[in-house]
Image (cartoon, coloured by chain):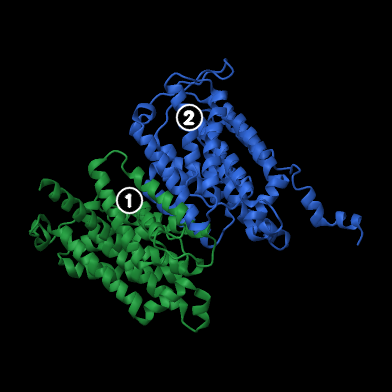
Chain colours: A blue, B green
Amino acid sequence: MSATDISMSPAVRDFAHRHRLRWWEPLPWIVAIGFFFLFPRHLGIGTEILVTILFALSLDLVLGYAGIVTLGHAAFFGLGAYAVGMLAHHGIWSEPLSGLVIAAVVAGIFGLVSGLILLRTTGLTLLMLTLCMMLLLEEAANLGQTWTGGYDGLPTVPIDPILGRFAFNPLIPDVQYIYILCVLFVGFIVVRTIVYSPFGESLTGIRENTLRMHAVGAPVRKRLVICYTISGAIAGVAGALWAQSNAYVNMSTFSLDRAATVLIIIVLGGYGRLYGAFIGAVAYMALSHYLAKIYPTAWQLGLGILLVCIAMFARNGILGMFDSLVARLRGKRVGP
Amino acid sequence: MIFGEDVAGIVLGGLAAGMVLFVVSVGLSVTMGLMGFVNLAHGGFAMIGGYIIVLSMNRLGVPFVPALILGFTLTAALSVVLERLFYSKLYRAAELDQVLFSIGLAFVMIATVTIVIGPETQPMILPSWLRGQIDLGFTSYRTYSIFLIVFGALVAFCLWLGFERTRIGAQIRAAVDNRKMVESLGINIDRLFTFTFAFGSGMAALGGGFGAEFLGLDPQYTLKYLVYFLIVVAVGGMGRITGVFYAALIIGIMDFILKKYLPAGGTIFIYVLTILILLIRPQGLFGRSN
């Protein structure tokens, strides 16, 4: 078979074109902008969902693409939140955009250092180490009373107007919503570019078969550490956005609850598929916001049953179920 | 002499807490070591067992020891059902699926107990023979703590005997080290798994009952102490009874000292210690490297 024949084969064409925009890819953004105009009274939950999407997206990079199972991803979220919160609360720095950069750098450095140390291990050990690192930071936030406000956190985080013009209004979070949507869009472009780059492809390779990637000479640990660092930085930005839009910081940003929730969200939506973060965050946050307030216990029961079902039957989440449904309708075999 | 009594008090209190940690964690260690299953719902079995023990004493007037036996049996029976229906399907699944499944199961357990019994803390009323102080000659201490230490040591000894000296113990040890080999020798590994899982859950139930008096027993117990159980298992080494025993005692005593002298943020030392141990010896302080 000649070279031109191979390049014409459907598999190769799919692979070479996989980064191209699909027709449905603008949909989430249209929905997000539509939400802004249609539900001006629900923008509070809207901003929270957008922050969660960014956070879940960062987890998707390490969990879905690189295959690093972590129980401590809230460590980065909390670092970002506390970095912005402490600087603003103590009157050192309250410009929002550069605050995001600071949060990204702080969380990224933590990701680099902890990644270099932790990513030598795998499996349960890694799970425990990421968990302990996060609990360590939580405890540190509890201890450093003078700076972090201890158990009660920082009640006020004053933020300057964005670009010196658009001030945050705590009652009507319309500025926050647009601001976070823009940051999320930038974050999404970054993650999407990484995922479809050769670097992202090698991450998938590491997830699928670490041994083989070692064998073909890929610098496995270096790639994992870089991925962990980038993901940490993005999670830090998500935490910073959370602190800015809520105008307070507390220890919940570091909690096991938050780490477990984002894990549930990304699995619910479908991990390793970019848009899983969107679907999962919307489904989870909307349900928990409206249901959990009315029937908290029933919500927990339902969530538990849902998780059991996903682990037992639907390992690719909502998007995975959708994919297999589409494939079945078209009469094709379900892909991996 | 006051200093001496202080030290004795710390050691005894820490040992008692450590024994409870051991009784709960030993099942988790074996599940992780033998089945390779990351079971985050283990605390749920301890919680359910604790409820059975405490409620049967408080509401039905069952004496302490029969209540313990009842808690062990019912929880073990429940775990057999769950193991056959769910756990056994996920032994070969990815870690992430196991984590999700067991978090989900933990949520279901918490919500079910909250709906059926209620969210409030259940008080543990000790039988009269375990109340008050006991004179040990050099110091006097709470009878219940001394009972826990003696009973925990006895349990540890019996488990060690069972592990080292019985046929089924040898099978479990062999399966922890090399599961394929054990299977090819014709040992029914499914039955071995079910038995071990049920036994581990039963032990967790006992631990839940024992700890109810000073840890507090409410539905949130399931996840509240999970980190401690996981740390004990990770430090002690998976599937190693003696390792878990020493790790539980070390963590128990350390926690007791830190809570007494460094009430704010003393746990930071436990996390640092765990991280260091896991980095230097990923197989745990007492685990064997593969």
Q: Amino acid at mark 2?
A: Ala
Residue with the mark numbered 1? B220
The x, y position of residue B121, in whole percent, is 24, 50
Other-residue count near label 2 (Cα within 10 Å), few / some / many at <14 / 14–19 / ≥20: many
The x, y position of residue B212, in whole percent, is 23, 56
Answer with left or right where residue A42 lies relative to residue B155. Answer: right
The quarter in which the N terminus of chain A is drawn is bottom right
Quarter-wise, where is residue A327 in the image?
A: bottom right
For the residues marked 1 and 2, what is the alpha-carbon distance in whole angstroms?
31 Å
The x, y position of residue B75, in whole percent, is 31, 67
Answer with left or right where residue A193 lies relative to residue B263. Answer: right
Q: Residue at x 26, y 40 (%)?
A: B263
Instruction: State which chain disc 1 sits on.
Output: B
Depth check: give the residue in front, A63 or B48: A63
Residue with the mark numbered 2? A83
Quarter-wise, where is residue A290 in the image?
A: top left
The x, y position of residue A78, in whole percent, is 46, 36
Q: In the orientation shown, which residue stands out farthest toward the bottom?
A: B186
Q: Are marks 1 and 2 on the same chain?
A: no
Q: Residue at x 41, y 62 (%)?
A: B237
Query: SS for tag 2?
Result: helix
Depth check: give the residue in front, A23 or B290: B290
Residue B120 makes an appearance in the image: no
Query: SS for tag 1?
Result: loop
The quarter in which the C terminus of chain A is drawn is bottom right
Answer above or below: position of B167 versus A111: below
Discs 1, 2 touching: Cβ within 8 Å: no
